[in-house]
Amino acid sequence: MRHRSVATRADLPLASTTYYFESLEDLIARAVEFSGNAELEAMRRRVGEVSHRRRGAEATVDLVLDLLVGPDGPDENTHGHLIARYERSVASARHPELREVQLRLRAQLDELLADALRRSDRSVRPEQLRRLVAVVDGAVVAALTESNPEPRRMARGALLEVIDIVAPPLRGEHADGHPRGPLNSTSGQTDRFRPLD
């Protein structure tokens, strides 16, 4: 990528890309941050619409997929956004200057997901949240390589298998107001996998 190709694509004078950005790397990092923040803002709006109530596995999975994948049904725009998101992730692995930006975006994404799960009366643990995202990411990337991609359908099937493990429903409220534990905490089901370090 060169400044000239960016200016041509944006239909701007070349000087505008060299004047406002210290380097090409700075321009790319700002573009990644802008794109990521736009996604996060859409997610915030969606989470803001979510009422606090107990949700079953299917309703919780659908909510998580609304945030991570987008609406159900064929949509070229949604596919384009998904491809761009995973391209950003790969680019941040290759370019250290993007890693800090991607980590900031990821921290905000984790907060939004945790909020959505709490509003669904689900237990939220950081290491399990990472597993939840990893399951969705793997299913979506696999689906995007198919001739007739259906990333949401594939991610939904994968996440339904594990949602009650990585984000189990909470028990009833304690009379003393202490935090409620997951329904299956005594069975040890939430600890089937060792934490990711």
Image (tube, helix red, strand yellow):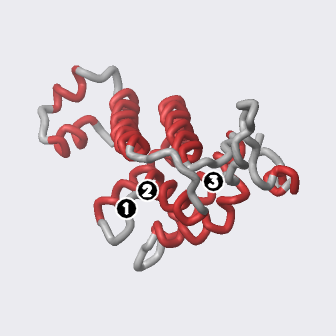
Judging from the image, what secondary structure is the residue with disc 3 in? helix
Query: Does residue 95 appear anywhere in the picture?
Result: no
Q: Residue at x 46, y 67 (%)?
A: 152
Callout 3, which amino acid? Answer: Leu
Which numbered disc flags the more N-terminal residue, 3 or 1?
Answer: 1
Q: Quadrant of the C terminus?
A: top right
Q: Quadrant of the N terminus?
A: top left
Which numbered disc flags the more N-terminal residue, 3 or 2?
Answer: 2
The Cα–Cα distance between marks 3 and 1, rounded to whole angstroms, is 18 Å
Q: Residue at x 37, y 61 (%)?
A: 71
- Mark 2 Cα within 10 Å, few/some/many (few <14, many 20+)? some
| Residue 69, image quadrant | bottom left
The Cα–Cα distance between marks 3 and 2, rounded to whole angstroms, is 14 Å
Which numbered disc flags the more N-terminal residue, 2 or 1?
Answer: 2
The circle on residue 132 is 3
Callout 1, which amino acid? Answer: Pro
Tell me: 53 left or right of 175: left
Contact? badges 2 and 1 (CB < 8 Å): yes
Residue 154 percent coordinates (x, y) = 53, 71
What residue is shown with label 1?
71
Q: Residue at x 33, y 71 (%)?
A: 74
Contact? badges 3 and 2 (CB < 8 Å): no
Judging from the image, what secondary structure is the residue with disc 1 in? loop
The circle on residue 66 is 2
Callout 2, which amino acid? Answer: Asp
